[in-house]
Image (cartoon, rainbow, N blue to C red):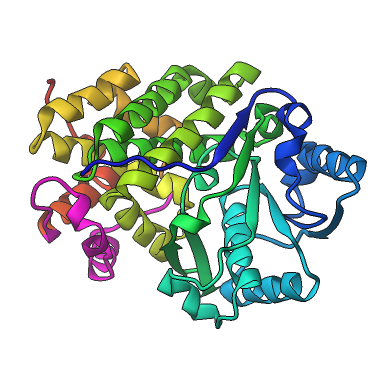
Amino acid sequence: MPKYFMPTTLLSGRNCIKRHSRHLIHGKKCMIITGKHSAVVSGALADVTEILNSNDVEFELYDKITVETGITEIYELGQTMKRNKIDYVIGIGGGSTLDAAKAAAVYAANDIEPMQIYEEVYENRPLKVVCVPTTAGTGSDTTQYVMMTLDDVHNKRSFSSPDCFPYATFLDSRYTMTLPVEVTRNTAIDALCHAVESYLNNQASAFSDIVALEAIRLIGSCAGALASGEFTEEDREKLLVAASLGGMAVAHTGLNVVHAMGHQLTCEKEIPHGRANGVLLVEFIAWMAKHDIMRAVEVVTALGTDLSDLRRFIDKVIPTTEEITEADIDKCIENSITDTVLENCPGEFTKEDERIIYYNALINKDRKYTEW
């Protein structure tokens, strides 16, 4: 039975924190969780602390989150929040930071050991989490999913709970204006993968399709900016909204084999997450066309392109500079986790399908696509 549940309050637009400040206040004491850089240079941290100070909300700042931050550090942060009687959490940053905020909120509210968080059922509801994204890609600000590093940057594991949806999210594109071009491209393509994997999914419904297709259209409308590396504030706004819509879509369908396969490229070749997923996307759509050509066509139509042009676009904005061999592909397949998402994948997805997608995406640079 199709259902739609998205309890996060979304506030968007320029200066939305100041215009909707009451949604930032959920107690007398909060923990702000960030990294060292983006929250400061984007201006987001200054906007948040101004509102907290003007409303006499006491806050503590934890600004040590990186993509390598592991479960032990997040657990200890949760224990600190518990001892210091923190009422709620504000996460400012990219996906790693927002996920850390969501996980720490679970630990702060429950007497559990670090790995018990993966049981996904908690005696107490997590502390409320407010998200202020400074990148446009992960969609963590609109999902119940949380990805954590198990103290080894190559070993990540996710969990989910309806209680882990953020309480509120502020989408202000000004906070993404200082993102480097490479990060903007990687995160935008990651958001595109979220939307496409949701649309080409056994769990898709009329509800998830609406937001997935709109995310695809918005990213497609920014193709010129992504190619040139020059972004207006309107482009940034579209990409930020698209990322949150992509999160809303996968919150209801889950991901597909692209992310499962891309994870292996990140582990084996240290290819950044968004680029590792994006390089496989065209081949996944081509594979999908054999099982449901109409939905595959709807994806490329929403992007305003065809598979050949999409392949050229992907190669331009997120070029694969790493040398990939067939032996590398064999290792990726050997360690594959695609079985975790096979129930979401229309058609029978085999190891040979996986091999062909890897090979055509990474080695067969002269691959030709049939016109639909």
Residue 122 in picture, x, y percent from top left: 49, 71
- Residue located 62% across and 27% down the image: 12
Of 86 and 269, the residue lying toward us: 86
Is residue 232 at all visible to an observer of this figure? no
Residue 96 in picture, x, y percent from top left: 58, 56
Extreme residue toward the bottom, this view? 113
Of 172 and 82, the residue lying toward us: 82
Residue 108 in picture, x, y percent from top left: 66, 70
**Which of the image's four quarters has the N terminus?**
top left
Q: Give the image quarter of residue 354.
A: bottom left
In magenta segment, residue 88: no
Q: Is residue 67 above or below residue 95?
A: below
Q: Is residue 292 above or below residue 227?
A: below
Is residue 291 at all visible to an observer of this figure? yes
Q: Give the image quarter of residue 304.
A: top left
- Residue located 38% across and 21% down the image: 217
Residue 162 in picture, x, y percent from top left: 44, 55
The total of numbered circles placed on residues is 0
Q: Is residue 121 left or right of 312 when viewed as pictured?
A: right
Of 253 and 300, the residue lying toward us: 253
Q: Is residue 230 above or below residue 41?
A: above
**Which of the image's four quarters has the C terminus?**
top left
Q: Residues in magenta?
A: 322-351
Of 191 and 371, the residue lying toward us: 191
Q: Is residue 12 above or below residue 338?
A: above
